[in-house]
Image (tube, rainbow, N blue to C red):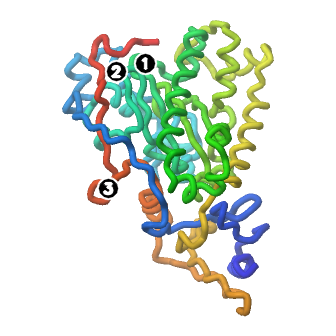
Amino acid sequence: KGVLGALGRVGMQPVAATLRARAGTFEARCTSYLAKAKEGAFPHVNQVDEHALAAFAGTPDELLAAHAKDPVLWRQLKNKCKRCPKCSKVLAFTLVTCNGCGVSVHDAPVVYLDNVFTAFMYGIERGEFPFTISMRKQTEQFLVFDDLLAVSCCHMNCIPTAQYVPDWRYLLKHPKEGLALVTAMHSECMDVFQSQFLSNRGFLTGTLKNGDKLSKEELSRLVVCGFNYPPSQFQLHLQFVLPPYLPFHFFMYESGLHYDKGRFFPFEYVVKVLQQNEPFPVDENTPIEQIVNHFAQRGVDYDAIHQMVYEGYGTTHRLLANWTADKFERIIADSKAYYLPTLPRASAGPCSALRADAELDVKTLLQTDKLVIQNYGRPYDKERPSGTYYKFAKSFPGGVAMW
Protein backbone atom coordinates (compact mmCIF):
# COMPACT_ATOMS: atom_id res chain seq x y z
CA LYS A 1 0.00 0.00 0.00
CA GLY A 2 2.90 2.32 0.72
CA VAL A 3 4.33 1.77 -2.78
CA LEU A 4 0.91 2.32 -4.33
CA GLY A 5 0.44 5.53 -2.39
CA ALA A 6 3.86 6.78 -3.37
CA LEU A 7 3.10 6.13 -7.02
CA GLY A 8 -0.13 8.06 -6.67
CA ARG A 9 1.72 11.01 -5.17
CA VAL A 10 4.02 11.27 -8.18
CA GLY A 11 1.07 11.26 -10.56
CA MET A 12 1.17 7.67 -11.83
CA GLN A 13 -2.55 7.01 -12.13
CA PRO A 14 -4.35 4.80 -12.52
CA VAL A 15 -2.46 2.02 -10.74
CA ALA A 16 -4.97 -0.61 -9.68
CA ALA A 17 -3.04 -2.82 -7.27
CA THR A 18 -0.17 -3.17 -4.86
CA LEU A 19 3.26 -4.12 -6.08
CA ARG A 20 3.29 -7.77 -7.10
CA ALA A 21 6.98 -8.60 -6.77
CA ARG A 22 6.40 -12.15 -7.93
CA ALA A 23 5.11 -10.88 -11.29
CA GLY A 24 7.77 -8.22 -11.72
CA THR A 25 5.06 -5.61 -12.30
CA PHE A 26 1.80 -4.33 -10.92
CA GLU A 27 -1.24 -6.56 -10.94
CA ALA A 28 -3.99 -5.87 -13.48
CA ARG A 29 -2.79 -4.01 -16.57
CA CYS A 30 0.75 -3.15 -15.66
CA THR A 31 1.88 0.43 -15.93
CA SER A 32 5.24 -0.15 -14.29
CA TYR A 33 7.95 -2.81 -14.08
CA LEU A 34 11.03 -3.69 -12.08
CA ALA A 35 14.47 -2.76 -13.44
CA LYS A 36 18.16 -2.42 -12.60
CA ALA A 37 18.69 -6.11 -11.92
CA LYS A 38 21.29 -6.93 -9.28
CA GLU A 39 24.41 -8.80 -10.34
CA GLY A 40 24.53 -12.31 -8.92
CA ALA A 41 20.83 -12.44 -8.07
CA PHE A 42 19.82 -14.69 -10.96
CA PRO A 43 20.69 -18.34 -11.75
CA HIS A 44 21.82 -19.24 -15.24
CA VAL A 45 21.68 -22.23 -17.59
CA ASN A 46 24.83 -22.46 -19.68
CA GLN A 47 24.79 -23.35 -23.37
CA VAL A 48 26.30 -26.65 -24.46
CA ASP A 49 30.09 -26.82 -24.65
CA GLU A 50 30.48 -27.53 -28.38
CA HIS A 51 32.87 -25.32 -30.28
CA ALA A 52 33.46 -25.00 -34.02
CA LEU A 53 35.11 -22.45 -36.30
CA ALA A 54 33.25 -20.52 -38.98
CA ALA A 55 33.06 -22.44 -42.25
CA PHE A 56 33.24 -19.20 -44.27
CA ALA A 57 35.59 -16.51 -42.96
CA GLY A 58 33.67 -13.57 -44.29
CA THR A 59 30.27 -11.88 -44.59
CA PRO A 60 27.07 -12.82 -46.46
CA ASP A 61 27.90 -10.21 -49.11
CA GLU A 62 31.35 -11.76 -49.60
CA LEU A 63 29.81 -15.22 -49.98
CA LEU A 64 27.37 -13.79 -52.52
CA ALA A 65 30.24 -12.16 -54.42
CA ALA A 66 32.07 -15.49 -54.51
CA HIS A 67 29.02 -16.96 -56.27
CA ALA A 68 28.41 -14.07 -58.67
CA LYS A 69 25.38 -12.94 -56.62
CA ASP A 70 23.50 -16.13 -57.46
CA PRO A 71 19.75 -15.29 -57.19
CA VAL A 72 18.94 -18.40 -55.14
CA LEU A 73 21.69 -17.64 -52.64
CA TRP A 74 20.70 -13.95 -52.57
CA ARG A 75 17.14 -14.89 -51.66
CA GLN A 76 18.39 -17.10 -48.86
CA LEU A 77 20.84 -14.57 -47.42
CA LYS A 78 18.76 -11.37 -47.54
CA ASN A 79 15.77 -10.29 -45.43
CA LYS A 80 12.96 -7.95 -46.37
CA CYS A 81 12.52 -6.04 -43.10
CA LYS A 82 12.58 -2.78 -41.15
CA ARG A 83 15.15 -1.59 -38.64
CA CYS A 84 14.10 0.23 -35.49
CA PRO A 85 15.62 3.74 -35.50
CA LYS A 86 15.94 3.71 -31.68
CA CYS A 87 17.19 0.25 -30.64
CA SER A 88 18.32 -1.02 -34.11
CA LYS A 89 16.31 -4.24 -33.80
CA VAL A 90 15.54 -5.91 -37.15
CA LEU A 91 11.75 -6.10 -37.47
CA ALA A 92 9.10 -7.60 -39.70
CA PHE A 93 8.39 -5.22 -42.55
CA THR A 94 4.71 -4.90 -41.55
CA LEU A 95 5.26 -3.76 -37.95
CA VAL A 96 4.32 -0.21 -36.96
CA THR A 97 5.66 -0.45 -33.38
CA CYS A 98 9.02 -1.93 -32.37
CA ASN A 99 8.49 -5.03 -30.22
CA GLY A 100 11.93 -4.55 -28.75
CA CYS A 101 11.65 -1.03 -27.30
CA GLY A 102 8.08 0.05 -28.07
CA VAL A 103 8.73 3.09 -30.30
CA SER A 104 6.85 3.77 -33.53
CA VAL A 105 8.42 2.38 -36.71
CA HIS A 106 5.50 3.41 -38.91
CA ASP A 107 7.74 5.57 -41.09
CA ALA A 108 10.82 3.31 -41.03
CA PRO A 109 11.75 2.27 -44.59
CA VAL A 110 11.67 -1.34 -45.81
CA VAL A 111 15.23 -2.55 -46.39
CA TYR A 112 17.09 -5.76 -47.29
CA LEU A 113 19.55 -6.86 -44.61
CA ASP A 114 21.55 -9.99 -43.80
CA ASN A 115 19.52 -13.09 -42.92
CA VAL A 116 21.24 -14.13 -39.71
CA PHE A 117 19.58 -17.56 -39.54
CA THR A 118 20.67 -18.68 -42.99
CA ALA A 119 24.09 -17.24 -42.22
CA PHE A 120 24.15 -19.64 -39.24
CA MET A 121 23.34 -22.52 -41.61
CA TYR A 122 26.23 -21.66 -43.94
CA GLY A 123 28.66 -21.07 -41.07
CA ILE A 124 29.29 -17.45 -42.09
CA GLU A 125 31.63 -15.72 -39.69
CA ARG A 126 30.17 -12.24 -39.40
CA GLY A 127 27.98 -9.44 -40.71
CA GLU A 128 27.40 -6.25 -38.76
CA PHE A 129 28.37 -8.34 -35.72
CA PRO A 130 29.91 -11.83 -35.26
CA PHE A 131 27.39 -14.53 -36.23
CA THR A 132 28.18 -16.73 -33.25
CA ILE A 133 25.45 -18.94 -31.82
CA SER A 134 24.40 -19.52 -28.21
CA MET A 135 24.17 -23.24 -28.88
CA ARG A 136 21.64 -25.59 -27.33
CA LYS A 137 21.62 -28.48 -29.81
CA GLN A 138 22.91 -29.11 -33.33
CA THR A 139 22.41 -31.95 -35.80
CA GLU A 140 22.78 -32.21 -39.54
CA GLN A 141 19.08 -31.38 -39.88
CA PHE A 142 18.31 -28.89 -37.10
CA LEU A 143 19.80 -26.11 -35.04
CA VAL A 144 18.41 -25.08 -31.62
CA PHE A 145 19.79 -21.92 -30.06
CA ASP A 146 19.03 -19.17 -27.55
CA ASP A 147 17.27 -16.13 -28.97
CA LEU A 148 19.54 -13.08 -28.99
CA LEU A 149 16.51 -10.91 -28.19
CA ALA A 150 15.00 -13.24 -25.61
CA VAL A 151 11.78 -12.23 -23.87
CA SER A 152 12.26 -14.80 -21.09
CA CYS A 153 15.11 -16.75 -19.50
CA CYS A 154 14.10 -19.76 -21.62
CA HIS A 155 13.58 -18.50 -25.17
CA MET A 156 14.89 -20.68 -27.97
CA ASN A 157 14.56 -20.92 -31.73
CA CYS A 158 14.73 -24.04 -33.84
CA ILE A 159 15.48 -23.91 -37.57
CA PRO A 160 15.78 -26.64 -40.19
CA THR A 161 19.24 -26.42 -41.73
CA ALA A 162 19.02 -28.64 -44.82
CA GLN A 163 16.08 -26.77 -46.35
CA TYR A 164 15.27 -23.14 -46.97
CA VAL A 165 11.67 -22.41 -45.95
CA PRO A 166 11.09 -18.63 -45.96
CA ASP A 167 8.16 -18.75 -43.53
CA TRP A 168 5.42 -21.08 -42.32
CA ARG A 169 3.06 -20.29 -45.24
CA TYR A 170 5.30 -22.31 -47.55
CA LEU A 171 4.65 -25.47 -45.54
CA LEU A 172 1.15 -25.47 -47.06
CA LYS A 173 2.60 -26.41 -50.45
CA HIS A 174 3.42 -29.83 -48.97
CA PRO A 175 1.33 -30.07 -45.78
CA LYS A 176 2.10 -33.68 -44.91
CA GLU A 177 5.84 -33.05 -45.04
CA GLY A 178 5.31 -29.68 -43.36
CA LEU A 179 3.54 -31.27 -40.42
CA ALA A 180 6.37 -33.75 -40.00
CA LEU A 181 8.89 -30.90 -40.09
CA VAL A 182 7.26 -28.69 -37.44
CA THR A 183 6.61 -31.72 -35.24
CA ALA A 184 10.31 -32.59 -35.41
CA MET A 185 11.28 -28.97 -34.64
CA HIS A 186 9.03 -28.98 -31.59
CA SER A 187 10.55 -32.27 -30.42
CA GLU A 188 14.08 -30.88 -30.74
CA CYS A 189 13.17 -27.88 -28.59
CA MET A 190 11.35 -29.99 -26.03
CA ASP A 191 14.38 -32.25 -25.69
CA VAL A 192 16.58 -29.24 -24.92
CA PHE A 193 14.00 -27.78 -22.55
CA GLN A 194 13.68 -30.92 -20.48
CA SER A 195 17.33 -32.00 -20.53
CA GLN A 196 18.98 -28.59 -19.98
CA PHE A 197 16.49 -26.26 -18.29
CA LEU A 198 14.27 -28.55 -16.24
CA SER A 199 17.28 -30.49 -14.98
CA ASN A 200 18.79 -27.26 -13.62
CA ARG A 201 17.89 -26.77 -9.96
CA GLY A 202 18.67 -23.07 -10.02
CA PHE A 203 16.31 -22.53 -12.93
CA LEU A 204 13.51 -24.53 -11.30
CA THR A 205 13.69 -22.80 -7.93
CA GLY A 206 15.29 -19.43 -8.72
CA THR A 207 13.99 -18.36 -12.12
CA LEU A 208 10.61 -20.03 -11.62
CA LYS A 209 8.10 -19.74 -8.83
CA ASN A 210 6.44 -23.13 -8.24
CA GLY A 211 8.94 -24.76 -10.62
CA ASP A 212 9.84 -27.49 -8.16
CA LYS A 213 6.15 -28.16 -7.43
CA LEU A 214 5.23 -28.92 -11.05
CA SER A 215 6.22 -32.02 -12.99
CA LYS A 216 8.20 -31.93 -16.22
CA GLU A 217 5.01 -32.80 -18.07
CA GLU A 218 3.08 -29.96 -16.41
CA LEU A 219 5.81 -27.41 -17.14
CA SER A 220 6.12 -28.66 -20.71
CA ARG A 221 2.44 -27.93 -21.29
CA LEU A 222 3.02 -24.30 -20.29
CA VAL A 223 5.50 -23.58 -23.08
CA VAL A 224 4.66 -20.86 -25.63
CA CYS A 225 5.34 -21.99 -29.22
CA GLY A 226 4.64 -20.45 -32.58
CA PHE A 227 5.71 -18.78 -35.81
CA ASN A 228 5.59 -15.19 -37.02
CA TYR A 229 4.48 -13.94 -40.40
CA PRO A 230 6.13 -11.93 -41.60
CA PRO A 231 9.17 -12.97 -39.61
CA SER A 232 12.15 -10.76 -38.86
CA GLN A 233 14.40 -13.51 -40.29
CA PHE A 234 13.15 -15.32 -43.38
CA GLN A 235 14.01 -18.86 -42.44
CA LEU A 236 11.34 -20.98 -40.80
CA HIS A 237 11.92 -20.84 -37.06
CA LEU A 238 9.87 -22.13 -34.19
CA GLN A 239 9.87 -19.79 -31.22
CA PHE A 240 9.88 -21.80 -28.01
CA VAL A 241 9.41 -19.80 -24.81
CA LEU A 242 8.69 -20.67 -21.20
CA PRO A 243 7.38 -17.71 -19.18
CA PRO A 244 7.87 -15.83 -16.95
CA TYR A 245 8.66 -12.97 -19.27
CA LEU A 246 11.34 -10.50 -18.28
CA PRO A 247 9.64 -7.62 -16.42
CA PHE A 248 9.86 -5.22 -19.39
CA HIS A 249 8.54 -7.84 -21.80
CA PHE A 250 5.57 -8.63 -19.59
CA PHE A 251 4.84 -4.90 -19.69
CA MET A 252 5.05 -5.16 -23.51
CA TYR A 253 2.77 -8.22 -23.50
CA GLU A 254 0.17 -6.42 -21.40
CA SER A 255 0.46 -3.43 -23.73
CA GLY A 256 -0.45 -5.68 -26.66
CA LEU A 257 2.99 -5.48 -28.28
CA HIS A 258 3.90 -9.18 -28.18
CA TYR A 259 2.25 -12.07 -30.04
CA ASP A 260 0.38 -9.65 -32.31
CA LYS A 261 -2.90 -10.99 -33.65
CA GLY A 262 -2.50 -11.48 -37.37
CA ARG A 263 1.27 -11.85 -37.12
CA PHE A 264 1.85 -14.49 -34.45
CA PHE A 265 0.58 -17.94 -35.37
CA PRO A 266 0.51 -20.35 -32.43
CA PHE A 267 1.99 -23.79 -32.94
CA GLU A 268 -1.44 -25.21 -32.10
CA TYR A 269 -2.99 -23.32 -35.01
CA VAL A 270 -0.31 -24.19 -37.57
CA VAL A 271 -0.55 -27.89 -36.65
CA LYS A 272 -4.34 -27.87 -37.10
CA VAL A 273 -3.98 -26.20 -40.49
CA LEU A 274 -1.37 -28.70 -41.67
CA GLN A 275 -3.46 -31.60 -40.36
CA GLN A 276 -6.08 -30.71 -42.98
CA ASN A 277 -3.54 -32.13 -45.45
CA GLU A 278 -4.78 -29.73 -48.11
CA PRO A 279 -2.07 -28.38 -50.41
CA PHE A 280 -2.39 -24.63 -50.83
CA PRO A 281 -0.53 -22.58 -53.46
CA VAL A 282 1.85 -20.09 -51.84
CA ASP A 283 4.32 -17.57 -53.18
CA GLU A 284 6.02 -14.49 -51.78
CA ASN A 285 2.91 -12.36 -52.27
CA THR A 286 0.25 -14.71 -50.86
CA PRO A 287 -1.70 -12.69 -48.24
CA ILE A 288 -1.80 -14.32 -44.84
CA GLU A 289 -5.46 -13.28 -44.56
CA GLN A 290 -6.27 -15.47 -47.54
CA ILE A 291 -4.81 -18.49 -45.76
CA VAL A 292 -6.58 -17.70 -42.48
CA ASN A 293 -9.94 -17.23 -44.22
CA HIS A 294 -9.55 -20.38 -46.30
CA PHE A 295 -8.88 -22.64 -43.33
CA ALA A 296 -11.54 -20.93 -41.21
CA GLN A 297 -13.98 -22.37 -43.73
CA ARG A 298 -12.48 -25.78 -42.90
CA GLY A 299 -13.20 -25.25 -39.20
CA VAL A 300 -9.78 -23.99 -38.07
CA ASP A 301 -10.58 -20.74 -36.25
CA TYR A 302 -7.45 -18.60 -35.94
CA ASP A 303 -9.12 -15.90 -33.82
CA ALA A 304 -10.38 -18.39 -31.24
CA ILE A 305 -7.05 -20.23 -30.98
CA HIS A 306 -5.03 -17.02 -30.74
CA GLN A 307 -7.29 -15.59 -28.04
CA MET A 308 -7.17 -18.79 -26.02
CA VAL A 309 -3.40 -19.18 -26.03
CA TYR A 310 -2.70 -15.44 -25.65
CA GLU A 311 -4.69 -15.27 -22.43
CA GLY A 312 -2.95 -18.43 -21.26
CA TYR A 313 0.48 -16.84 -21.71
CA GLY A 314 -0.33 -14.17 -19.13
CA THR A 315 -1.76 -16.74 -16.75
CA THR A 316 1.42 -18.81 -17.04
CA HIS A 317 3.56 -15.74 -16.37
CA ARG A 318 1.68 -15.01 -13.17
CA LEU A 319 1.99 -18.63 -12.07
CA LEU A 320 5.73 -18.86 -12.64
CA ALA A 321 7.08 -15.31 -12.23
CA ASN A 322 9.67 -15.05 -9.48
CA TRP A 323 10.86 -11.47 -10.01
CA THR A 324 11.09 -10.41 -6.40
CA ALA A 325 11.74 -6.75 -5.62
CA ASP A 326 14.90 -7.57 -3.64
CA LYS A 327 16.58 -8.55 -6.93
CA PHE A 328 16.11 -5.07 -8.45
CA GLU A 329 16.97 -1.49 -7.52
CA ARG A 330 14.59 0.60 -9.64
CA ILE A 331 11.07 0.68 -10.98
CA ILE A 332 10.13 2.11 -14.38
CA ALA A 333 6.90 4.05 -14.81
CA ASP A 334 5.92 6.35 -17.66
CA SER A 335 9.36 5.63 -19.21
CA LYS A 336 11.15 7.11 -16.19
CA ALA A 337 13.27 5.39 -13.57
CA TYR A 338 12.50 5.66 -9.86
CA TYR A 339 14.29 4.29 -6.82
CA LEU A 340 12.51 1.34 -5.30
CA PRO A 341 11.41 2.34 -1.81
CA THR A 342 12.53 0.38 1.20
CA LEU A 343 9.34 -1.32 2.34
CA PRO A 344 8.64 -0.24 5.92
CA ARG A 345 8.56 -2.62 8.87
CA ALA A 346 5.21 -3.25 10.49
CA SER A 347 5.86 -0.51 13.02
CA ALA A 348 6.88 2.07 10.46
CA GLY A 349 4.63 4.52 8.68
CA PRO A 350 3.93 4.58 4.92
CA CYS A 351 6.94 4.92 2.68
CA SER A 352 7.65 8.33 1.19
CA ALA A 353 7.01 9.32 -2.40
CA LEU A 354 9.18 7.57 -4.95
CA ARG A 355 12.33 9.49 -5.86
CA ALA A 356 13.20 9.81 -9.54
CA ASP A 357 16.62 8.71 -10.80
CA ALA A 358 17.19 11.33 -13.46
CA GLU A 359 20.67 10.03 -14.32
CA LEU A 360 19.49 6.64 -15.56
CA ASP A 361 18.71 6.21 -19.25
CA VAL A 362 15.91 3.62 -19.50
CA LYS A 363 17.07 2.21 -22.85
CA THR A 364 20.59 1.64 -21.52
CA LEU A 365 19.16 0.19 -18.31
CA LEU A 366 17.10 -2.39 -20.21
CA GLN A 367 20.16 -3.50 -22.17
CA THR A 368 22.16 -3.86 -18.95
CA ASP A 369 19.34 -5.84 -17.31
CA LYS A 370 19.25 -8.18 -20.29
CA LEU A 371 22.95 -8.94 -19.85
CA VAL A 372 22.50 -9.59 -16.14
CA ILE A 373 19.45 -11.86 -16.39
CA GLN A 374 19.67 -13.70 -19.72
CA ASN A 375 20.93 -17.22 -20.42
CA TYR A 376 22.00 -16.24 -23.94
CA GLY A 377 25.75 -16.66 -24.36
CA ARG A 378 26.41 -18.20 -20.94
CA PRO A 379 29.03 -18.69 -19.69
CA TYR A 380 30.28 -15.20 -20.51
CA ASP A 381 33.75 -14.57 -21.90
CA LYS A 382 35.26 -11.45 -20.32
CA GLU A 383 31.81 -10.35 -19.19
CA ARG A 384 30.32 -10.66 -22.69
CA PRO A 385 28.17 -13.44 -24.22
CA SER A 386 30.09 -16.29 -25.82
CA GLY A 387 29.12 -18.49 -28.74
CA THR A 388 30.20 -20.80 -31.50
CA TYR A 389 29.46 -21.76 -35.11
CA TYR A 390 27.42 -24.57 -36.63
CA LYS A 391 29.63 -27.62 -36.96
CA PHE A 392 27.45 -29.08 -39.75
CA ALA A 393 27.65 -25.93 -41.87
CA LYS A 394 26.18 -26.27 -45.35
CA SER A 395 27.89 -25.46 -48.64
CA PHE A 396 26.53 -23.69 -51.72
CA PRO A 397 25.28 -24.93 -54.09
CA GLY A 398 23.56 -28.10 -52.98
CA GLY A 399 23.77 -27.86 -49.22
CA VAL A 400 20.41 -26.19 -48.62
CA ALA A 401 17.43 -27.30 -50.71
CA MET A 402 14.60 -24.92 -51.56
CA TRP A 403 11.32 -26.11 -49.99
The residue drawn where x is 27% and y is 31% is 124
Marks 1 and 3: which is nearer the front? 3
Residue under label 3, please give it: 384
Tag 2's secondary structure? helix
The residue drawn where x is 54% and y is 69% is 327
Residue 239 vs 105, above or below: the answer is above
- CB of mark 1 within 8 Å of CB of mark 2? no
Is 209 or 353 nearer to us in this picture? 209
Q: Going from the N terminus, do you reach mark 3 or mark 2 first? A: 2
Tag 1's secondary structure? strand
Residue under label 1, please give it: 164
Is 355 or 242 nearer to us in this picture? 242
The residue drawn where x is 54% and y is 48% is 151
Query: Could you say where residue 225 lies in the image, as x and y percent from the top left?
Result: 60, 34
Q: Is residue 240 left or right of residue 163?
A: right
Marks 3 and 2: which is nearer the front? 3
Q: Going from the N terminus, do you reach mark 1 or mark 2 first? A: 2
- CB of mark 3 within 8 Å of CB of mark 2? no
Residue under label 2, please give it: 74
Task: Count the numbered circles shown.
Answer: 3
Q: Which mark is residue 116?
A: none
The residue drawn where x is 70% and y is 53% is 319
Is 339 or 113 nearer to us in this picture? 339
How crowded is the residue under tag 3: few (<14 C-alpha within 10 Å), some, or many (20+)?
few
Query: Could you say where residue 79 lies in the image, as x and y percent from the top left?
Result: 42, 29
Q: Going from the N terminus, do you reach mark 1 or mark 3 first? A: 1
Query: Could you say where residue 145 lies in the image, as x and y percent from the top left?
Result: 43, 37
- CB of mark 1 within 8 Å of CB of mark 3? no
Give, as a three-letter code, the residue at label 2.
Trp
